[in-house]
Amino acid sequence: MAPDRRGNLGEVNIEIVIHVNRVYRLALPAATAPTLSNRIATKFGPRRSIVHVMALFARFSTHRKVEQLIRNGVGIRESTWQIGDHGPETKDALIDGVIRWVRSSMGEMRRPYGIDHVALALAARDREGKVLCSNSLGVLRPASFYADDGPEQIRAFLLDAERSMRGAPGEMVGALLSLGDIAFELKSRAA
């Protein structure tokens, strides 16, 4: 702010940094500055109370805690299966094996507050360990693996994996993340 000869604020200088290398300057008469500042959209929107700001920090803190729990392997189960150019019966047996593993893993998971969701990711890699194909089936409820949805998604992944591997043998890796285990750990660490 720059005062005039009488000490009154004649204009308000505003600098807005949008990019690291660009600074936009704006000089306004002091009387219009408050109304304009209310209209300027900033990254955080209008002024927030300290309670709201603390809630934002808590949300980011929880996000960091969840990331750390996952990095530490909390709620994660992994398994591998040999894949290659097999007949239809072998594919069906492989799909049944994956479904049995998912169901068994879900049976060992904690379910605080009724949180029974899981995230399943599959990857196919060759003999040297290079990942040729991967897919996340997303966040699913256990019922998906007792209906036709789960087996059909796994069958579709196997078809993609076979195309990527061009008939060469390899392995399929499955990783299952229990959101209930994550919630349980967050609750127990907060206590």
Image (cartoon, rainbow, N blue to C red):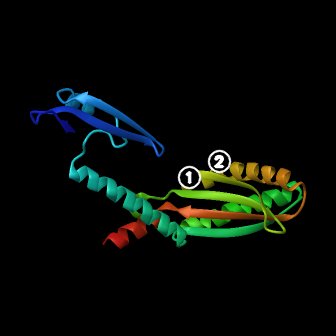
Would you say residue 40 is visible in this rendering?
Answer: no
Q: Which one is earlier in the sequence, the residue at label 1 or at label 2?
A: 1
Query: Which of the two residues, 90 or 190, is positioned nearer the viewer here?
Result: 190
Which residue does the image show at 48% across and 44% down from the upper left? 21
Q: Residue furthest front?
A: 5
Name the residue type under label 1. Answer: Leu
Side (left or right) of 17 relative to 126: left
Q: SS class of the residue under badge 2?
A: helix
Q: Quadrant of the C terminus?
A: bottom left
Name the residue type under label 2. Answer: Asp
Relative height, residue 166 to residue 190 (above, below): above
Q: Determine crowd level at label 2: few under 14, some 14-19, many 20+ residues with C-alpha closer than 10 A.
A: few
Q: Determine crowd level at label 1: few under 14, some 14-19, many 20+ residues with C-alpha closer than 10 A.
A: some
Marks 1 and 2 close (CB-CB < 8 Å): yes
Q: Alpha carbon of mark 1 to alpha carbon of mark 2: how far?
A: 10 Å
Relative height, residue 73 to residue 132 (above, below): below
Which residue does the image show at 65% across and 48% down from the upper left? 149
Relative height, residue 37 to residue 98 (above, below): above
Which residue does the image show at 34% across and 39% down from the upper left? 15
Query: Which of the two residues, 120 or 4, is positioned nearer the viewer here?
Result: 4
Percent x, y of residue 66? 45, 63
Percent x, y of residue 12? 23, 34
Give the label on residue 140, or none: 1
The residue that label 2 is drawn on is 149
Quarter occupied by residue 131: bottom right
Which residue does the image show at 26% across and 28% down from the upper left? 28
Side (left or right) of 146 relative to 46: right
